[in-house]
Amino acid sequence: MKPPRRVFVVGGAQTPFLGRGHPDFVWKGHPDFGARENPTLDEHIGSAVLGALAAANVPADAIEKGYVGNFLAECFARQGHLGAMVAAVDPGLHGKPFARIEAACASGAAAIAGCIDAMAAGHDVTLAVGAEVESGVPGRDGIDFMARAAHYDRSRAWDPFTFPWLFARRAKAYKEAFGATDLDLGGVVEKAYANASGNPDALMRAISVTAEEAATASERNYLFLEDEALRDHIRLLDCTSFTDGAAALVLATEAGLARLGIAAERCTEILAYGHTVRALGDELHGDPLAFDNVAAAAAIAYRDAGVGPDDVEIAEVHDCFSISELLQYEAIGLAGRGEGAALLRSGATARDGRIPVNPGGGLLGGGHPIGATGVRQVLEIHRQAHGLAAGHQLARPPRVGVASNLGGDDRTAVVTVLRRA
Amino acid sequence: MKPPRRVFVVGGAQTPFLGRGHPDFVWKGHPDFGARENPTLDEHIGSAVLGALAAANVPADAIEKGYVGNFLAECFARQGHLGAMVAAVDPGLHGKPFARIEAACASGAAAIAGCIDAMAAGHDVTLAVGAEVESGVPGRDGIDFMARAAHYDRSRAWDPFTFPWLFARRAKAYKEAFGATDLDLGGVVEKAYANASGNPDALMRAISVTAEEAATASERNYLFLEDEALRDHIRLLDCTSFTDGAAALVLATEAGLARLGIAAERCTEILAYGHTVRALGDELHGDPLAFDNVAAAAAIAYRDAGVGPDDVEIAEVHDCFSISELLQYEAIGLAGRGEGAALLRSGATARDGRIPVNPGGGLLGGGHPIGATGVRQVLEIHRQAHGLAAGHQLARPPRVGVASNLGGDDRTAVVTVLRRA
């Protein structure tokens, strides 16, 4: 989909992504335990929305419509109706049409897509929000909640850890088919945590991991699947962690920019996106060696944007598990089939490589507050493109970027192509 | 919002709305208990989508995009990612961009609004689905889930029955301010159940209630609020019941109709809609005597449609509680402030009245599978307008209709104006 009216990212903000591993996150082992609480869902949404308005220098009452991407607030925070929670952030937002969009882990990108459509319908300034607060419930409950991104009833036959099991299945197949190793997957983790160390908003900014550590089972990096056939193919560090956080973006058309008095040069244009959805419950029927659905979305996005993988100077990909990053490289055309591990080994996707991928830590290093992720990815590309990325700014601000947000096991894919205006 | 490209309802379908009170609904007291199960969420969605495609005479692969409105599947059915569940219904839907929209009890209308925006962006044929399966959990859990349409944490101080409490508060204030009586509210219930008796898809099609019965506390119609100050102002029959069901609509632009070879005369045009959202958590700060937010949405919808309340020949209003119907009359301009009860008493909103309201039973009589309701309302107007409403068809098919879908206690309002094409 090429936006029929041009759409620009004017500015945005994210909250620090919090969870186990982040020095500010309060839990049983933290010195502040009992003395203060972690921020609530309201607080994350409020901070991100007000931060985005401030970063864009846009008054709240200029917002005409918006969507909030969220997957599981009804389970984690006993809260639905998040559109009305966004309307509560500022009096300037009262009365505006906000609603929640849910597409599992691709909820954030789907919210942006909703805003793009709204702008096609005549709105000139919109707000895309993404948020998730996942702490405050026992881990087992959290794992069970996550299974709602697959066909829950069918998934019960697989393993209690639905998504780690699905991606361990892919990791095993990938290693067997293409000669990749656990150390290659460890290399994904090492890069993610290293990149997070420069990002003040990253969950894992204070933690470092080597590829060897990530590739080796240990007390810190344990095996946990019940299925013996797949148990050795995923460790704790291969997985994203429960995270609290929110991100928000102000989007505008050309008419909106003119009305707001904002120069397009400050902005990043959304050239096109592809959004494709495959059948829930069919997770085991596709090719475990590829994200075919992401590839379909990427093909649409590149076609409609009029650019190709060779033009991409930054990619934010959905590394929900270490294997996902390699499959994402291949699905968005950065590497050929089975060549993702070699691309990583070559250093091309490092911060100083030819095509930096997840230079702020991605999901593994930066954290994955689910609904926020797709919004955070686009924010990251906007910030990198304009030299606004704080401690993890790339030396050469990229011009063309791709964000790839995934829901479930290759069920919902949203691939977005952006270009500095 | 006036759709920038004209949008037509081509056809749609709903599943029979099931729950306690419906002869086909299996529960402990039913002779089939243990012998068969009630339909699942997949099955409701599948039936509604295939039924809508059949009714519209549109092949699945003609659908270009769609949204599914749903409030609480993650709680009631342990299921998110419903966009991918829609994609699973038919091979022709595979790969298409579907996502879920959530706006509490207004999720269905918000899904239609999302489709309208998608059509503005260039899609010509879209699918709006709404679904909820609420059975299968204990009633107390269901009540707790519903509180997620308010600000959950703040609502804990009110009453365990969040929404009955909020609407009892409105009922008490309305009776005191305007001299309405419990018998007036009972009249809403009587009309709803009587209208449902002709509707083969209605939850309460086999049950009749008189206004006197509805207005009198009894073993069948008990008081249940804990708050003594409001306890007498709501009874069981004043409330909608937990319901399972789904509804779906095929929508098309003029270009879409041309491509499909469908005459506009078969269709109902969506002239305009208003979508307004007020701050979650502020439920106690507004005027209990009016749905101010619904009125704001209605004003936008009428203005953009170029019609007024006097033109309306059918209204589908969100009678989540008996008091809601009277407040809806006033908010959408069928009656002046405080005059809703008099309008009901006059018979004007009866099936043979000047402006029939909820001629198939609405939410109280027809059932309220939450995400399905907003879609079912528009379907109902389309069917009535074209003489397709089975046993509850109005004698004179209406030309102009209004659907008013509400989320929370006057937090999200979506008012849609339609006209037979």
Image: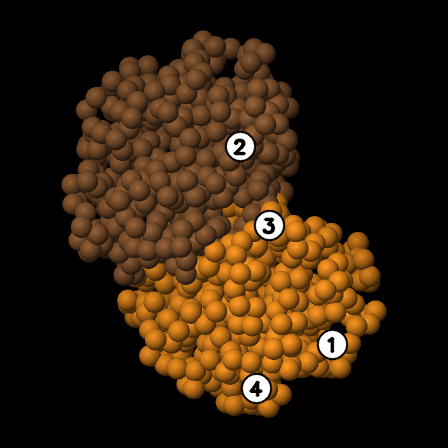
Chain colours: A orange, B brown
Specify which label sits upstream in the sequence, 3 or 1: 3
Between circles 2 and 4, the one closer to the viewer is 2
Distance from the alpha carbon under mark 3 to that under mark 4: 35 Å
Q: Residues within 10 Å of mark 4 (few under 14, many from 20)?
A: some
Pointer 1 chain: A
Q: Which residue is mark 3?
A: A154
Residue at mark 1: A214
Q: Nearer the viewer, mark 3 or mark 4?
A: 3
The residue at which mark 2 appears reads as B38
Position above or below: A12 against A344: above
CA separation in Å, label 4 and label 1: 19 Å
Do discs 2 and 4 share a chain? no
Question: Does residue A101 appear in the picture of this structure?
Answer: no
Closer to us: A335 or B233: A335
**Pointer 4 chain:** A
Frontmost residue, A180 versus A306: A180
Callout 2: SS: loop
On screen, residue B285 above or below A417: above
| Mark earlier in primary sequence (3, 4) | 3
Mark 4 sits on what residue? A343
Name the residue: 54% across, 15% down. B221
Disc 3 from disc 1: Cα separation:
31 Å
Neighbour tally class for label 2: few under 14, some 14-19, many 20 plus, Cα within 10 Å: some
Task: Identify which amino acid the numbered label 4 is placed on.
Answer: Leu
